[in-house]
Image (cartoon, coloured by chain):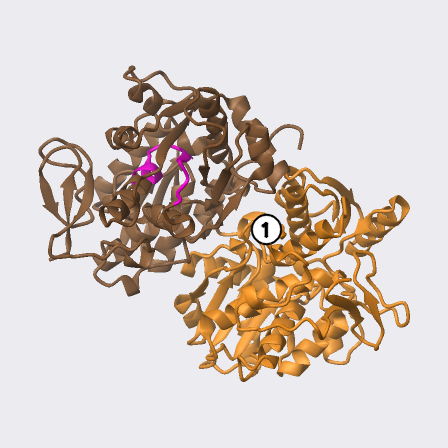
Chain colours: A brown, B orange
Amino acid sequence: MYHFILACTECSASYSADMTTLHCTKCNSVLDVAYTAEEAYDVRSNPSDMPVPLRNPADAISLGEGNTPTVNLRNLGDSLGTSHLYAKLEAMNPTGSFKDRGTAVMISVAKEMGVTQVVEDSSGNAGASVSAYAARAGIYAHIFAPASAPAAKLGQIAVYGATTHAIDGDRQAVTDAAVDFANSNGIVYASHNLSPYFIEGTKTFAYEVVERFGDDLPLHIVMPVGNGSLLIGIHRGFAEIEAAGEISRIPTLHAVQAQAVMPLVAAFNGKPAPTTGATIAGGIAVANPPRLRQCIRALGDTGGTAVAVAEADILRWQRQIARQEGVFIEPTSAAAFAGVKALLDMGKIRSSDPILVAATGFGLKDAMPPSDV
Amino acid sequence: MYHFILACTECSASYSADMTTLHCTKCNSVLDVAYTAEEAYDVRSNPSDMPVPLRNPADAISLGEGNTPTVNLRNLGDSLGTSHLYAKLEAMNPTGSFKDRGTAVMISVAKEMGVTQVVEDSSGNAGASVSAYAARAGIYAHIFAPASAPAAKLGQIAVYGATTHAIDGDRQAVTDAAVDFANSNGIVYASHNLSPYFIEGTKTFAYEVVERFGDDLPLHIVMPVGNGSLLIGIHRGFAEIEAAGEISRIPTLHAVQAQAVMPLVAAFNGKPAPTTGATIAGGIAVANPPRLRQCIRALGDTGGTAVAVAEADILRWQRQIARQEGVFIEPTSAAAFAGVKALLDMGKIRSSDPILVAATGFGLKDAMPPSDV
């Protein structure tokens, strides 16, 4: 008996905790962790006090993820037309992206539950992260990734010893191949998009923001969103801290997507899913995010919005932040800064509002910017 | 009038603080920062209490360097034959290597002293680091690097906006070209090898080790050594903390070099400098380290030694740590683990001795390991 269950995100169904239940059998929606009432937690805006889905947190598989620095970007803020711009440098996680927060918890739960092999599908960052944490846990990992992913990302997956399955076709084809492989071989599908445990890891971002800013939180948090595991985790973390009475309001959360792949932007505005094209922001090139409704709620509940940005703007702000601030981020992360500009131009953010951007991944993980560098 | 001077490392000469004095005019030795007697410091094994060569530490140029995690490597320890193996993951610095510690202080001093342009020479990591911090400081950087450096390292230097000067020839040719350029253009030569300020930054490593372990320090700290800025900084940091009475002993410091480029190993053993060859460990391919005598003292004073390792062993342990622990380091860092094995085999370290390895740089910064991945 665990101190948590898995609760449907859309209906009232719930399930006992395991590593294989990923959807509600009644309505087919995705699941979240729900802590049992007996499990009383004393949340004090401190990650070590937060509820975690582990019996023995001291045995968690960790590579030192989280506790990333927050830096003030005065130079870039001037260029964007905002006076209080901060970035949380998620590249300074063990494998170079925020994914390590979620993976650490997902793989720790897997280890605690006796799992010996996992299957994951990823455009790159989550694959590298799962490969690394599985290696440390002694769990064998099969990572399915698009054959078109940057060579550095595919190489990073392989270096930790996972078997890489490079799949031709679009992102959905990669997921389908991973699910087929998991089912036909009886291996746990440890999907960072679907696993309720992954989000229990990404919520540490919110705890750290409260540790850093206290109740004087940034008014806005802007982030790139593909599957939305960071958005949902941040929302969940702040909700826990607010419920504990430690903060008086939750920052307004905004999602940024590439114009080429913008299902959340369309859905948030009540429009049908658009056809997708190619984007340099590989980490958010997700046409059918399974947690779309949760993403929309996270934005709506906090008064935020979803915006789409052009490829040229992604590259422009990637170059600008490196040259003005010495921060080298991947295009996916740069999309968030292009999004800040769009949100300022739209009047959704005022120039005097404090803004925090989740700079989600290291520039070294991708190809170098193609022009003028 | 600053609260510190520059003191010769070999004779009694001293100089007032500036950014251009790099050698003693009497004996041509390199210089260290020496704090004036009036500047009373209360060192409490806490980086925020340590002496720094800045008038206004609050205005320091920072990207969130330091405070890297220390992880226990049980799987790799079993393979190496040691029961208490830790690594401090220096890849989790803003540009992906320990160099950011030194650069942060060196560039902060430059900014405080009104410097607007700097010249640096580097095999890659220090160049990327100086390029990044200079960008954030609004200082224009010229980085001289070997044309043969990995493409990812050269690309990273360029992305922050520095002018990269790729030089054919050996490492010394790169240094000579940088010095010539600085002299003929009247630009400050902000050399991470020579600048006394750089070492004031790397000493934070020692403060963090004391914060993490208290007085129950690892018996041995093993690190790759090229120019020795980390070795000298760690020694200096521990010496400050010991002088303050906060620790009762300094860990034994060991240096690891590649057999192909091992001037410190030769000098430590009283042998003439050997001819140098090619090594995959580019970060320690330094044939003529200007702080060689300081390196020898840091080893000798702590009872440590210098060992050289083979190319095949560097690659072997690079692959092993990724596959067993999920930690992807560059070959230069892997040399340190090969060095642990050598030190165990030589009886310089006992299998039960707690060992900390400085895992100095991220694997993504280099080419992927060439075989079997």
How many neighbours does mark 1 have within 10 angstroms: few (below 14), some (14-19), or many (20 or more)? many
Which image quadrant for residue A25? top left
Determine the chain carrying the residue at label 1.
B
A235 up-or-down from B4: above or below: above
Q: Is residue A327 visible?
A: yes
Say which quadrant the N terminus of chain A sits in: bottom left
Taking the magenta stretch, the answer to whether it contains residue B172 is: no
Taking the magenta stretch, the answer to whether it contains residue A224 is: yes
Q: How many numbered discs sit on the rendered protein? A: 1
A104 up-or-down from B26: above or below: above
Residue occupying the point 26% across, 31% down: A301
- Residue B291 at x, y = what percent? 75, 68
* Apparent side of residue B125 relative to residue B323 in the rendered image (left or right): right
* Apparent side of residue A279 relative to residue B124 in the rendered image (left or right): left
What stretch of residues is rendered in magenta? Answer: A216-232
- Residue B241 at x, y = what percent? 58, 76
Secondary structure of the residue carrying tag 1 is loop
Which sits in the foreground, A71 or B322? Answer: A71
Say which quadrant the C terminus of chain A sits in: top right
- Residue A293 at x, y = what percent? 24, 29
User: In the rendered structure, which amino acid carries the disc numbered 1?
Assistant: Ser
- Residue B349 at x, y = what percent? 53, 81
Which sits in the foreground, A358 or B366? Answer: A358
